Image (cartoon, rainbow, N blue to C red):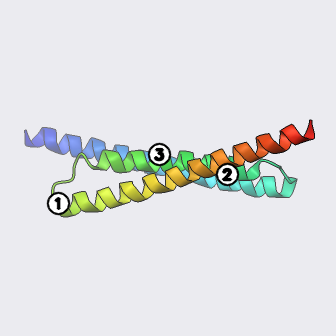
Amino acid sequence: MHFAEELLRTIISWGVLFFEYIGVVILILSGIHAVIGIFKRSPHIRLDLARGMATALSFKLGGEILRTVVVQTFHEIAIVACIVALRAALTFLIHWEIGHMEREEAHLSSREK
């Protein structure tokens, strides 16, 4: 039983690292894309950056949720719950901003027609 528990902890640790690193890579690539878009004067750069940030946060949130499988004390649960709540709130705000920007772009494009 001890072996199975340690195996599960190892698999989860690697899974958490995987999700966290994928989130970081997406965030860095989105930032680089945004900087390039600024120099090219891309009209949709804010929207693209917000989408990249939302995707990155989703991966990082997935890592935190996976981490909840191995927490053992109430203190650890409280810390993970706070991190999940914060990341979920950030994801919600970014999605709200994306919706706002999409409506704004739709409104502007309908004016141009």
In the rendered image, which residue does mark 3 sit on? 59
In the rendered image, which residue does mark 1 sit on? 74
The local secondary structure at tag 3 comes to helix
Q: Residue 49 has which mark?
A: 2
Q: Residue at x 25, y 61 (%)?
A: 78
Marks 3 and 1: CB-CB under 8 Å?
no
Q: Position of residue 28 (x, y in %)?
A: 61, 55
Does residue 1 lie above or below 70 as drawn?
A: above
Closest to the observer, 62 or 19? 62
Mark 2 or mark 3: name the one nearer the start of the chain: 2
Quick check: 112 left or right of 90?
right
Q: Residues within 10 Å of mark 1 (few under 14, many from 20)?
A: few
The amino acid at mark 3 is Phe
Compute the Cα span from label 1 to label 2: 36 Å
Closest to the observer, 68 or 1? 68
Q: For marks 3 and 1, give the one nearer the viewer.
A: 1
The amino acid at mark 1 is Phe
Q: Residue at x 7, y 38 (%)?
A: 1
Compute the Cα span from label 2 to label 3: 16 Å
* Extreme-left residue of the structure: 1
Q: Position of residue 65 (x, y in %)?
A: 34, 47
Mark 3 or mark 1: name the one nearer the start of the chain: 3
The local secondary structure at tag 2 comes to helix
